[in-house]
Amino acid sequence: MMEIHQTQTYKGFRWQVTFFFLFSWLCHSASGQLHYSIAEELKQDSVIANIVNDLGLDVKEVKSRRLRIVSRVSEKFFSVNLGNGDLYVKDRIDRETLCRAAPTCFLTFDAVVENPLNIYSVKIDIKDINDNSPIFFHDTITLEINELTPPRTHLVLQNAEDPDIGSNAVQSYRLSDNQYFTLNENISIDGSKILELVLDKPLDRETLNFHELILTATDGGNPKRTGTALLRIIVTDYNDNVPVFTQQVYKISISESAPINSTVTVVTATDKDDGTNGHITYSFSRTAENAFHTQMFNINPANGEIKTKGHLNFEVTKHYEMSVQAKDGGGLLAQSKVLIEIKDENDNAPEISIASLSTPIPEDSAPGTLIALIEVHDQDSGENGEAECHILGSSPFQLVTSTSRYYKLVTTSALDRELVPWYNITILATDRGSPQLSCIKYIKLDISDVNDNPPVFVKSTFAAYLPENNLPGASIYSVYASDPDAGDNSKIIYSISNINTEDFPVSPYFSINIETGVLYAQRSFDYEQHKEFQINIMAKDNGSPPLSSNATLIIHIIDQNDNAPKILYPSTESGGSPFFEMVPFASVQGSLITKVIAVDADSGHNSWLSYHFIQMSEPSPFSISQHTGEIRTSRMFQEKDILKHKVVIMVKDNGEPSLSATVTLSLVVGDHFQHVVPQINNEFNDGEPSSNMQNIYLVIALALISLLFIIAVMLVIISKCKESKPPPEFPTLNTNLYSQFDPRMLSNYNNGTLGLPYAYNVCVALDSSESDFSLLKPNQNVPVENLIDADDSGLGNESSKETLSPVEVKQITFWTFFDGLQL
Ligand SMILES: *[C@@H]1O[C@H](CO)[C@@H](O)[C@H](O)[C@H]1NC(C)=O
Ligand SMILES: *[C@@H]1O[C@H](CO)[C@@H](O)[C@H](O)[C@H]1NC(C)=O
Ligand SMILES: *[C@@H]1O[C@H](CO)[C@@H](O)[C@H](O)[C@H]1NC(C)=O
Ligand SMILES: *[C@@H]1O[C@H](CO)[C@@H](O)[C@H](O)[C@H]1NC(C)=O
């Protein structure tokens, strides 16, 4: 009934007035008090009712009775038109302002009239109209809900407010469409409604971290009014996600030459969580195994960058296997593996080592002889570690592959120590890497000597010229042979022998210093006896077996003018009596009388003879041919001429100084022998006394010689006794001459060669009383047969008997020759 009334009030003024009449009446009749009911928010000057009528007063009297409204509050809102008695709204009446949320709201005032004074109480009920919409206190409601919040969780929301009351107040709420949330209204203990947000479905921040919903509150007015608020729901993170590496295994290969601090790789892990829950730090897992593998690397905790910490070396470690972990702020872990393979670089040069080396090797080693075993090693792998060996330069060697890493160094051709005594073999090893690395090894190979070279004389034939009457023991010549071999193989020992063993032995005549090759004459030579010697000199080295070579030494004895001419005819042997020659008186000028024949044992110039007269009594009827020695008449004889001539003929050789011989010749001029005989007899008579005298002299001389001989023999005996004391020694000279000589070698060279101690004794005579140059005195140590060939064929006998004078030999020859001429 009330609501309808209200509705009428809204519809029109007329309807309203009608209603008020009815209503006023009802009130008046019920209580004697005026009671009106009006809606709030009526327009100003709206007429509520005719209060004068309702009070039962006369409109004409109202003015005079001074009707007025007395109220502290209501005066402001109502007034009375005294002209017609209408009560109307003076000011805006807002129920919500006047009464707030009170269920009833009214204003009261007293209507006072005078004459008589009557006071009427008037009560005006203020009815609510839906003039307010629901309002949320915050336009935007922000909620933080952890993603882990379980479903069916209720969250209290602040209610919307609507100052209207009753059905005009908030009746319902609505939430915009969504999957997660619904609304619930709960009634609290005090009966008020509690608006709750209910979580229907689990939240996941990682899927949707923010929800915006519209919350609408609707009241029950007609028309309904609504109010909205924006509901912002922030889903907060829970550390519900572990970090995840982008790869299960990171495989990287890196060169071993990578410098320090170079980036190997970057490991990355993600965490869907937010904030610290999503903040990842990287590290290497802590295990003993890992500690070893990670010693060369650093990981950046912030970004997972793995860098090298030290110098990698393929030759030490070829791969690293590390486990890395990523940890978020909530402590959740993820692990991954990092496999780092180190790539080889050619950073190691090959190395050459000599496994075995035989040096020196003999020069007669056959081609193919193994000298050394060489090992080549390269620490790198693959091609970087494959090394090849070569010999640099040209040498008679080659490398033969033995196994992959071993080479045999062998000779390729014959060696000759005399040409190349040692080799510096250069071996180069190169690997196949890029860039190529190489190394060089030097091998010094010594070639040891083999006695493959005989001693060589500078000439095959030597010629020596030795003047006769030389000093025995003096050196006369020196031969030299060289031997290119080394050591004992080049130590040369000289020896002499005859060219032809059938000749006389050479040893008594010459000796050779076996070390120096100096040749000594053992005795004085006589050109007239030996004009030439041919000696075979052998140089033999000390190798094993020894090698030798021979040379011929021809010693030419040079003539000296040591022989005076010897007159053969006329003979001077005939007891001193001059030689007679008959000269026929009638000889014509130039007739040959006789011929002086002389010889000179010397040769060459020394034997060129010239013939001269000496002691010539003035112009002689004879002349002598200077060259032929022929004596001829130089003119015819005359009667007055002396018949008996004595000429002295000198034969002179051409030597320097020249030697000469004289002969006295008696030339008797006559026709018959008888004619001449007296003269000859005279001559003999003249000679007789002298002949007797000569005999006496001869006897005396013989006696003297015998005496001298006895004295000489005694002296010899005395000297022999003295000789029994030890012979003088010459240590200084001995050591100087033969100090480096091995005495054992002596026995080999005694044959045909003078033994050393003996040779020395002969060569150097320090004491003439002890050692005679011309006399070969055997030393106790040296057998006599070594000195003088006992088996002498006629010529070697000189030592035992008095030497036959060469002149005598020649004389015999010439006698024979002359006899031949005469015959
Ligand atoms: C209503 O609220 C009370 C106390 O606040 C609670 O115990 C009750 O379970 C709630 N009812 C519903 C249906 O949520
Ligand atoms: C590597 O980096 C560290 C840190 O930046 C630095 O201290 C170090 O000197 C670097 N080493 C080289 C060799 O560059
Ligand atoms: C070998 O030759 C090399 C290069 O010429 C040199 O350095 C080295 O000293 C030589 N070795 C010998 C033992 O002479
Ligand atoms: C040298 O001569 C000796 C003796 O005459 C002889 O035995 C030897 O074989 C000769 N050597 C050579 C190389 O002719």
Image: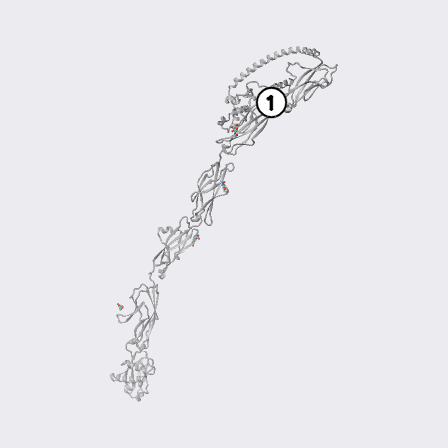
Question: x%, y% of residue 123?
Answer: 28, 81
In the picture, the quarter occupied by the N terminus is bottom left
**Vertical comparison of 805 with 272: above or below:** above
Q: Is residue 483 visible?
A: yes
Quarter-of-image position of residue 776: top right
Query: Within 10 angstroms of label 1, few (less than 14), some, or many (20 or more) residues?
Result: many
Tag 1: amino acid: Glu
In the picture, the quarter occupied by the C terminus is top right
Question: x%, y% of residue 458?
Answer: 56, 32
**Vertical comparison of 742 with 433: above or below:** above
Considering depth in this image, is 784 or 310 the residue closer to the camera?
A: 784
Question: x%, y% of residue 17?
Answer: 30, 85
Quarter-of-image position of residue 607: top right
**Residue located farthest toward the front when viewing the structure as drawn:** 823
**Vertical comparison of 556 with 212: above or below:** above
Considering depth in this image, is 601 or 736 the residue closer to the camera?
A: 601
Quarter-of-image position of residue 271: bottom left
* Residue placed under numbered mark 1 in the picture: 528
Question: x%, y% of residue 90?
Answer: 33, 82
**Residue located farthest toward the left when viewing the structure as drawn:** 30
Numbered marks: total: 1
Q: Is residue 736 visible?
A: no
**Residue located farthest toward the bottom when viewing the structure as drawn:** 60
**Vertical comparison of 28 with 350: above or below:** below
